[in-house]
Image (tube, rainbow, N blue to C red):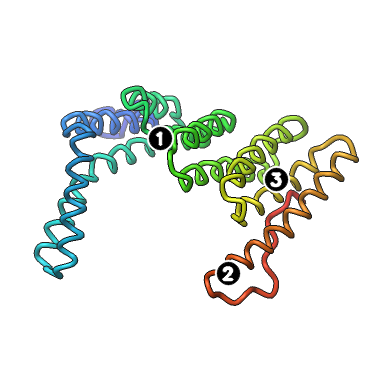
């Protein structure tokens, strides 16, 4: 907080960005606490979505409008939480965002959505290890295959993004690549013909090859990347044929770790 003395009139207090974010967050939290609890909102939202779908089937404009407003109103609490969290992230107050969402996660320990949000905050804060740790929890908590695959792919994306930034070298880069590869391989075990999982592995092997100290290790990683790139292309073409699409003449190569 700083004090500004104008030429005329009383001194004016100017708030810093973190102080403004805190002030807004305090007001948001007061409003959030005054709302119905999350379980009730979830129940009401389910009923509201059903009503909206039924209204659309009848093509009743008035009924559709009323049902849509109900859905929008019930989503306001989560939207407000999102705005509040963004204020903390924009002002680099990552711990405050973590404290808030981890508090919710303690109240709802089986809610994988909350753990995913926490993983995203850790990533914004630059802690890729904690981010991956929480995305792995999301995968473990998810009961359906598609959600598990999404969590594993998030881990692969975290690894790709951080390695592509070229801010890690040596042992740390290898560690991150290994964690990403382990997650993607777990996903591939569930969906062997998913070309995205395979292509992302190829990219991580390429990144790891540049971080390896021994030339023989780099050579093995480059060979693995080449094989996975070929497999990714084959799987992509198979997927397109299964969907009735014409195969591409030159499928794009996955990103590599080259400069």
- Which residue is more in the foreground, 6 or 61? 61
Indicate which disc residue 74 carries. Answer: none
List the residue tagged with mark 3.
204
The image quadrant that residue 142 belongs to is top left
- For label 1, the crowd category at 10 Å Cα-Cα, with few meaning under 14, some 14 to 19 and many 20 or more, is many
**Which residue appears at 62% of the width and 43% of the height?**
184
Indicate which disc residue 112 carries. Answer: 1
Marks counted in the figure total 3
- For label 2, the crowd category at 10 Å Cα-Cα, with few meaning under 14, some 14 to 19 and many 20 or more, is some
Residue 52 image point, x, y percent: 18, 58
Residue 4 shows in this picture:
no
List the residue tagged with mark 2.
240
Residue 7 image point, x, y percent: 30, 34
Marks 2/1: CA–CA distance: 32 Å
Marks 3/2: CA–CA distance: 24 Å
Residue 177 shows in this picture:
yes
* Dot 1: element: helix
Q: Earlier in the sequence, mark 2 or mark 1?
A: 1
**Residue that lies at the very extreme toward the left in this rendered image:** 62
Q: Quadrant of the N terminus?
A: top left
């Amino acid at each position: 907080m700083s004090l500004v003395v104008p030429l005329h009139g009383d001194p004016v207090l100017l708030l810093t960005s973190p102080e403004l974010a805190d002030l807004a967050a305090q007001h948001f939290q007061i409003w959030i606490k005054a709302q119905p609890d999350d379980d009730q909102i979830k129940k009401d939202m389910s009923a509201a979505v059903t009503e909206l779908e039924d209204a659309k089937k009848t093509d009743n404009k008035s009924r559709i409008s009323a049902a849509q407003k109900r859905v929008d109103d019930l989503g306001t609490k989560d939207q407000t939480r999102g705005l509040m969290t963004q204020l903390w992230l924009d002002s680099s107050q990552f711990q405050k965002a973590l404290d808030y969402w981890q508090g919710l996660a303690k109240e709802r320990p089986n809610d994988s959505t909350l753990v995913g949000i926490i993983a995203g905050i850790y990533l914004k804060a630059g802690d890729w290890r904690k981010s991956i740790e929480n995305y792995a929890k999301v995968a473990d908590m998810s009961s359906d295959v598609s959600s598990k695959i999404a969590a594993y792919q998030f881990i692969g994306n975290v690894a790709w993004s951080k390695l592509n930034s070229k801010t890690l070298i040596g042992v740390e880069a290898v560690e991150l690549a290994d964690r990403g590869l382990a997650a993607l391989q777990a996903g591939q075990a569930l969906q062997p013909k998913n070309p995205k999982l395979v292509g992302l592995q190829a990219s991580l092997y390429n990144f790891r090859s540049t971080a390896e100290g021994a030339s023989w290790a780099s050579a093995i990683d480059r060979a693995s990347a080449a094989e996975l790139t070929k497999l990714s292309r084959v799987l992509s073409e198979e997927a397109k044929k299964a969907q009735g699409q014409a195969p591409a003449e030159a499928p794009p190569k996955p990103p590599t770790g080259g400069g």
